[in-house]
Amino acid sequence: MISIAIHIALIFILALLFQRRLKVEDKAVFITAIFIKIVCGVLLGWLYWGYYGGTGDTLYFFDQAGKLYNYFQIGQVSFAEWFGFQEIHLTVEEFSAQTEPRTYFFVRWLSYLFALTQGEYFTMAIYMSLFAVFAAWKFVKRLTLILPDHKSAIYVAFLFIPSVTFWSSGVLKETFMVTLLYFMGYFIIKWYHKNSRWLLIIPILLLFWALWLLKYYVPIVLVPILLLTLLFSVQPGFLKDIRFHWKLTIYFLLIISGGLALSFLHPVFSSGRFFELIKVSHDTILQHSTEAKIVFIDATTPFLFFIKNIPLAWFTGMFRPFPWEAFNLFSHIAAAEQFLFVLLFLFAIRLLFVIKITHQEIWWILGIIIYSTVLATVIALSTPNFGSLLRYKVAYMPFLWFLVLWFVSKRFNQRNKG
């Protein structure tokens, strides 16, 4: 209890020091975001410890992090092995997380937090939630400097969407992922607007590397889209005289070729087993799903399975579950949130033909839609379970929420000015 009290006091002091630098109008938003995030991290732990009877990914990660730290303490794992400088010499029975590289990377990082908190699960959950909300706050503050007229849309999308906030809190890979993603976004925006920009490439590359090790499919999709969207929105000289439809063609061709080139750096793609692994993941998750399962069209080969289900997978990843597909309290809340998103998405499509959109904004709209479309399709198809899908959607849903809320905000601002 003394250890927990010390950490809570430390967390409180850090939050207090951080918020002292904020403007008065931002303090209430920041404090609320911290409070909700910490509560979500604790609730997520309670959900797995209590409601699910002590099973689930978060408890497996916690258990494996504890084992790794304990092996280090008794000298069975060296300092170099613990920090990843040397290959670990443990059997699979002793440490099973090493069989999956992404899980091993996360568990190794988590073991450092285990050491700091002396194995207090909920203290670890609070720290991870705190890291995530700090990263999100740095990102949204940079974003509001660029889009000062859309502050509310930015705050809601990246700080207060219930399912995103909940499933990116506590001891989960997704919490670490959004921390890396938002910090990378913060440094990219800062790099884009600072004269000393080249020094900022170092943290960007480090964050990209960590994100690659944790969730390789996110940077594979994000990086080509982000780089090309930045390029086309700036409109350098060689692009200015090209007609828009040709620019659009070049944009899509470069995204496809860039994504393919980047993807083949990872064994999943270079081995030629991408479609097979999606089908294997789909079948495994479907086998262990009951009322939460998502049914796709079967096919004779993994490639045909992928091609046949692209439309349904995209629709599922973007808009489901619907209210009539909910099966418990948590899914009803998520379904209500998704239903609201569907209504806003349809309204945004209508606004697309009403509001004035600049040439630069078109590329950012396209970028968000392509990024979300690719991830929504692949994630939904490989994860045919609504519970798991809601968790994995945190990689792209904040950006989709921002897009639809941006349309509403832009319409509101134009009506006020007009």
Image (tube, rainbow, N blue to C red):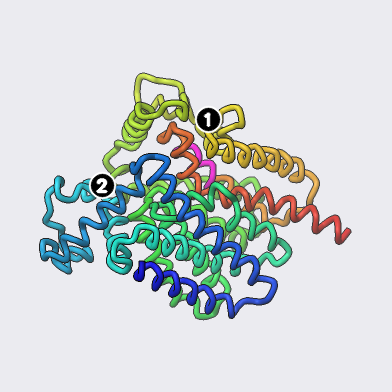
- Name the kind of residue labelled 1 in the image: Phe
Instruction: List x then y, in percent, for residue 212.
Output: 36, 55
Q: Residue furthest front?
A: 1
Q: Residue 326 is drawn in which quadrant?
A: top right
Q: In the rendered image, which residue does mark 2 sit on?
A: 100
- Which residue of the protein is positioned furthest toward the right in this rendering? 418
Closest to the observer, 186 or 368: 186
Position of the N terminus by quadrant? bottom left
Q: Which mark is residue 303?
A: none
Q: Which residue is mark 1?
A: 327
**Relative height, residue 204 to residue 161 (above, below):** below
Q: Residue at x 35, y 26 (%)?
A: 287
Q: How crowded is the residue under tag 1: few (<14 C-alpha within 10 Å), some, or many (20+)?
A: few
**Callout 1 secondary element:** loop
Instruction: Give the side of residue 277 with respect to residue 243, left or right.
Output: left
Amino acid on which disc 2 is placed: Glu
Which residue lies at the image location 40% right of the left edge and 44% below the top edge? Answer: 50
Extent of the magenta region = 371-378
Is 384 left or right of 17, judged from the image as shown? Answer: left
